[in-house]
Amino acid sequence: MSIIKACIIAVSMYSKIPMPQFEWEEKSMRYALAFFPLVGVIIGALQLALFYIWQKSGLVVQIYAALATVLPIVVTGGIHMDGYCDTIDALSSRQSKERRLAILKDANVGAFAVIWAVLYFLLCYGAWSSVVQDAIYADKTVCLIAAGYASSRALSGLAAVTFPNANKKGSLAAFSSPAGKGVVCTVLILIFAASGALQLALSIQTGVLITTGVLCLFLYYYYMSKKHFGGITGDLAGWFLQCAELLILCIAVITAGI
């Protein structure tokens, strides 16, 4: 029963998908992060469904690209994009660690966050527009991207339970501190490996580039968070997730015809 509750907690926390309501207990939260990639699986499945609908309906490319761009935001409610924007503001401030952490907690959105959010969505829109330009590789490319939603969340969850935490009272700490680290880490590593294996099966070259790219970003995430913030927070986790998704999308599109 605790495992089922852990699954419900993960989906309800990291998405807007309606789930049963109950009191969150430490016992139930212990393994919640192990189910975090499930949200990615759902998003990936919805992206595949959207692509299938586009193929059958004759929907114009621009509308398809716009829908594919906003789909992850709609499913998650923008929780990770909020962290991305807060992190951009904090990094752009060039202040002390304490001041950067204070900026992360600030509900106001700064100019740099707006600028980089616009750039982010422009890149996503351009990439999704390019996906469907080459009909020969479009199916494979969308599958590569869809698998990435689970792998990015597997790495994000792995960081949550292994990286230093800068805010012991934040939402991320609430999930990572009671975590059954051994089990959670094992599950998340297996999910990342399975996603990578699927991408390699679809395209060896692209799969290698995606895996290498996200692992390099993962290492930079550790370095950046420790240097500038003294550890990770929920906002930094959102920054990493959004960057990983964009990186996977761009690599898949750029290498589609190679």
Image (tube, grey):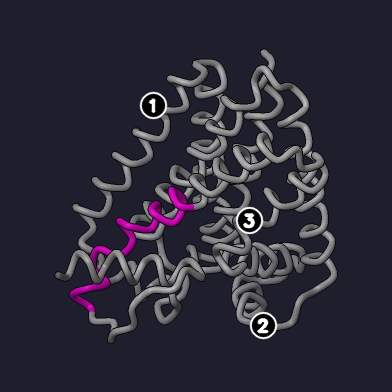
Q: Is residue 167 above or below residue 155?
A: below
User: What range of the chain is rendered magenta?
Assistant: 26-42
Residue 55, given in percent of the width and then of the height, sits at: 67, 34
Please name the amino acid that badge 1 sits on. Answer: Ala
Q: Determine the secondary structure under disc 1.
A: helix
The quadrant the N terminus occupies is bottom left
Q: Quadrant of residue 96?
A: bottom right
Please name the amino acid that badge 2 sits on. Answer: Asp
Q: CA distance from mark 2 to mark 1?
A: 40 Å
Please name the amino acid that badge 3 sits on. Answer: Leu
Q: Which mark is residue 174?
A: none
Q: CA distance from mark 1 to mark 3?
A: 25 Å
Viewer-closest of 110 and 100:
110
Residue 24, given in percent of the width and then of the height, sits at: 29, 82
Q: Residues within 10 Å of mark 3 (few under 14, many from 20)?
A: some
Q: Which residue is mark 3?
A: 71
In this rendering, position of residue 184 left or right of residue 128: left
Q: Which residue is mark 1?
A: 197
Outermost residue, top side? 258
